Amino acid sequence: MRLNVRAAVAATALLLSASAASAQATATWYIGTYTNDILVWDEASEQVVDRIAMKNFFPIGVTVSESKTRLYVEDASMQRFEIVDLATNRAIDEFTLSHDSVTVRFEGSAFHPDDTKAVLLVKRTTKMTDRFLVEGPFILEYDMRTKQVTDTIPFPDGESRDAVGFAYSPDGRTLYMFADDIIAVDAETYEEVDRWEISKPLEPGLGSLNFGVASGTYDEPGVATNLVRMRDPVQNRTLMGIAQVRLDEQDVDFFMLGPSEPVSGGRGFALAPGGQKAYGLYSTVGRYEFWEFDLADRRVARKVPFAGRPRMGLRVSADGEKLYVFVAGNTIDVYDVDTFELLRTVTFDEDMTGTAVIAGGR
Amino acid sequence: MKHLRAVNQKATRIEAYVAWEAEQAKAEEMDVVGLRTPPHEETGPHFPMGCSLVFSPGWEVDSQGGTAGLCQPVERDIFDCHLGCFWPAPVPDQLNHAPDWTGKCASAQKDWRKLDLIFP
């Protein structure tokens, strides 16, 4: 796979052009809880508008399908996925590979855009009369229509791993595997078609790029905007910047902001609707700050201290006017995006687990 | 690079690093450094991987060895130790022995008195 990396110095139309997700009036949150229910929370009214009852106690992983018509919900035992129809907000199906004395836990997953099959990373434990037999991990292709395992997929480079990330391309033709490198395989034959050697430095004297590949709510399909970090071995320091990754085009646009600071990527970073701004959470013991990133001018626009808490996640509202701080516990703190002042705290009756958001609502 | 000559300290350091990197690549026997940051990237003490070892998120002590970095209030985090860390000593083991430990207590901060005692 061609590693096509463009630094900001050479790129003129960087993040703005691709992150042009138009501002939405509202968004719908699907919040897993420490009960059997998933809360359906309307962002505009800040009310729980529905509850989706799960059969299995309790939902931890909530994944929105590519078509945004389904949720795939993993239970806390990691043995079952329930499928939720978003037209009715009801669970319509489930699947598991466990049976009798055999326990199969899902340790990774990706669902095909046409919702017919999934790729699963599993471990199998069999309770024998005198011992437990642990086998795996295996990568399996699972047909969700016939509820059968239809293929065993080789590990990247033939090396068995406890952790491999997966993602299908939006058209479903390619399956990406995230190991040391990003390996693209044909989604039918599982033969390698391309390889992105991100484990190697771009050029001698540089460290390798470390960036996220998961798309946010306000990224375009197939695009992931997130923090990027790169070790500068010569100056013995780590640099931090922002990267926009397009897996289908094997392309990364990035710019560096300066020395790395404890601003978390992943759930502590959120791209705003429209793609011109992004926000991050700076978090050390006893000190917390909102960071505002100006993606047009490629700089940190503001750093504002606030009364944060350990283990926070961040999202931007669909209208771009509010920030939501949540994750641990049963509250969502709502902040004004202009002043970074706490507006109010939304309190649920249940602690939260995994969360998924669909812009625009349903 | 044959036509370029380092004229300042930073460029000289880059040349030295690239030469060192090339020398390392020639070595036939490489050390196994699993779970370890490469030596030239180390900036502080080496922490082994794993939340139990680095106390992250941790609710007895934080990553600095103190208590200021704990989830606040502590009940906010206790369920995630039960769910994500599989840490059998301080909280019941969710996967195998006490999957419904939180069944009567949907919100630890509000309902922690409803949490059951678990005996082996």
Image (spheres, coloured by chain):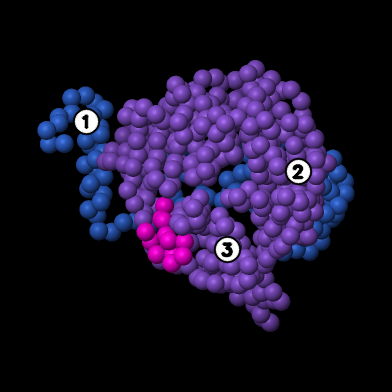
Report the Cα–Cα distance between label 2 and label 3. 26 Å
Badge 2 vs badge 3, beta-carbon distance below 8 Å: no
Residue pictured at 42% horizontal, 60% vertical: A185
Q: CA distance from mark 2 to mark 1?
A: 59 Å
Question: Regarding mark 1 in the picture, which secondary structure is present there?
Answer: helix
Do discs 2 and 3 share a chain?
A: yes
Q: Chain of mark 2?
A: A
Q: Residue furthest right?
A: B114
- Seen as rendered, the residue at the extreme left is B3
| Chain A visual colour | purple
Q: Is residue A158 above or below residue A53?
A: below
Q: Are marks 2 and 1 on the same chain?
A: no
Label 1 belongs to which residue?
B12
Q: Image quadrant for the C terminus of chain A?
A: top right
Magenta range is A182-193
Chain label for disc 3: A
Residue at x 55%, y 34% (from the top left corner):
A21
Closer to the eye: label 2 or 1: 2
Residue A168 visible to an observer of this rendering: yes
User: Going 48% across and 41% down the picture, which residue do you hit?
Assistant: A223
Q: Secondary structure at mark 2?
A: strand
Image marks 2 and 1: residues in contact by CB distance under 8 Å: no
The part of the image, by quadrant, that contains residue A13 is top left
Q: Which amino acid, mark 2?
A: Val
Task: Give the residue at mark 2.
Answer: A40
